[in-house]
């Protein structure tokens, strides 16, 4: 049984599908490092996103109690079903960007691992963000640019983004392994990074309303060249411009600041205060 993606694809008469963003990890040493970073034990159930030809899966089934191999390419699903025969694997044809961890027959906290296709990285990340209470750790390969954004701080300029804030508020984020483009077939144009995401039991800052927190962050970054005041005014039409200014000044924020200058703590305080003002506004209109 070959574990080499090139040989397996050739054996099954397949080739990488460029529109699907398929780049297969072909270096055995790097595969081993990534699997070891996850640290699965026989007590763990592991979800693998984008199982591909099974480069990681071959190793995972030797370590974990059970592996759910998720792959949306049905040609590759057929490869996995033929090449992998183990009692502790479930191969599933599904789109990771829409996959619900609740559908798995397992009540404990999962481990998640995956080589994410570059063209659907963001949807998968946000899908996992919403399901963070269902897993204890995720080891994900993303392009270096995305890894830099997730781990960025306000001092990091354009890298600091919605991803930085939403993941920084809810996860312990770590860039674990740099993965050169030379380790892939076909070779992509960019390098990759393995990121480690471990959900906090509670957000690292006090957030009264998670939906409003996300809304506030997204509005603040809606147009990066616009001031915080202007972006919030467009995103929260319930308030007049003077009211937005008053809210910002109450938090010692300048209306001319831009969203990328605020820390996670400041965004939490801003969304909490906006929530209080919205609640008071709705109460006044209902009376």
Image (cartoon, grey):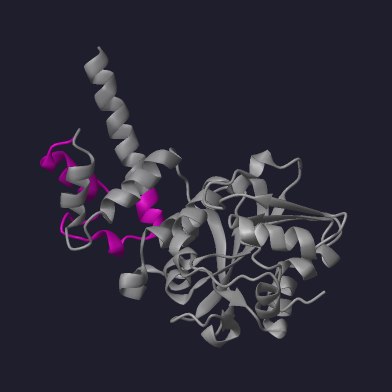
Judge left or right: residue 78 versus residue 97: right
* Pick the front one: 161 or 33: 33
Residue 135 as seen in the image, left or right of residue 126: right
Q: Residue at x 72, y 71 (%)?
A: 35
x, y percent for residue 116:
55, 65
Residue 125, x across and y down, in percent: 50, 56
**In the figure, residue 276 lies in which quadrant?**
top left
The stretch drawn in magenta includes residue 265: yes
| Lateral position of residue 225 relative to residue 15, left or right | left
204 left or right of 62? Answer: left
Q: Is 31 in the magenta?
A: no
- Determine the residue positioned at 44% across, 64% down: 119
The prevailing secondary structure element of the residues shown in magenta is helix
* Quadrant location of the N terminus in the rendered image: bottom right
Q: Is any part of residue 49 visible from this angle?
A: no
Question: Height in image: 202 above or below 85?
Answer: above
- Toward the bottom, the furthest residue is 182
Which corner quadrant of the image does residue 24 belong to?
bottom right
Q: Which residues are magenta?
A: 239-268
Q: Residue furthest top?
A: 287
Give me the residue at 57% from left, 81% from top: 184
Residue that lies at the very extreme toward the front in this rendered image: 13
Q: Is residue 192 above or below residue 40?
A: below
Give 15 or 67, whichever is nearer the viewer.
15
Q: Position of residue 118 (x, y in %)?
A: 47, 67
């Amino acid at each position: 049984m070959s574990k080499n993606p090139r040989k397996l694809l050739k054996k099954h008469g397949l080739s990488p599908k460029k529109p699907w963003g398929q780049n297969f990890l072909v270096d055995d040493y790097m595969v081993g490092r990534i699997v070891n970073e996850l640290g699965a034990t026989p007590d763990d159930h592991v979800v693998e996103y984008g199982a591909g030809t099974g480069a990681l899966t071959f190793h995972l089934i030797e370590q974990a109690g059970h592996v759910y191999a998720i792959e949306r390419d049905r040609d590759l699903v057929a490869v996995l079903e033929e090449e992998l025969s183990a009692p502790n694997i479930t191969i599933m044809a599904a789109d990771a960007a829409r996959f619900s961890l609740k559908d798995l027959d397992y009540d404990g906290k999962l481990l998640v691992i995956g080589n994410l296709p570059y063209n659907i990285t963001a949807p998968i990340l946000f899908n996992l963000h919403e399901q963070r209470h269902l897993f204890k750790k995720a080891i994900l390969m993303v392009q270096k640019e995305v890894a830099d954004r997730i781990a960025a701080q306000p001092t990091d300029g354009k890298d600091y983004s919605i991803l930085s804030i939403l993941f920084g508020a809810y996860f312990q984020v770590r860039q674990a392994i740099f993965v050169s483009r030379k380790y892939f077939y076909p070779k992509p144009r960019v390098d990759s990074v393995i990121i480690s995401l471990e959900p906090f039991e509670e957000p690292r800052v006090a957030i009264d309303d998670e939906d409003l927190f996300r809304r506030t962050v997204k509005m603040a970054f809606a147009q990066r060249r616009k001031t915080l005041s202007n972006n919030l005014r467009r995103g929260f039409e319930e308030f007049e411009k003077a009211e937005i200014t008053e809210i910002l000044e109450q938090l010692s924020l300048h209306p001319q600041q831009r969203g990328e200058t605020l820390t996670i703590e400041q965004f939490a305080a801003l969304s909490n205060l906006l929530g209080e003002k919205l609640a008071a506004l709705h109460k006044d209109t209902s009376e």
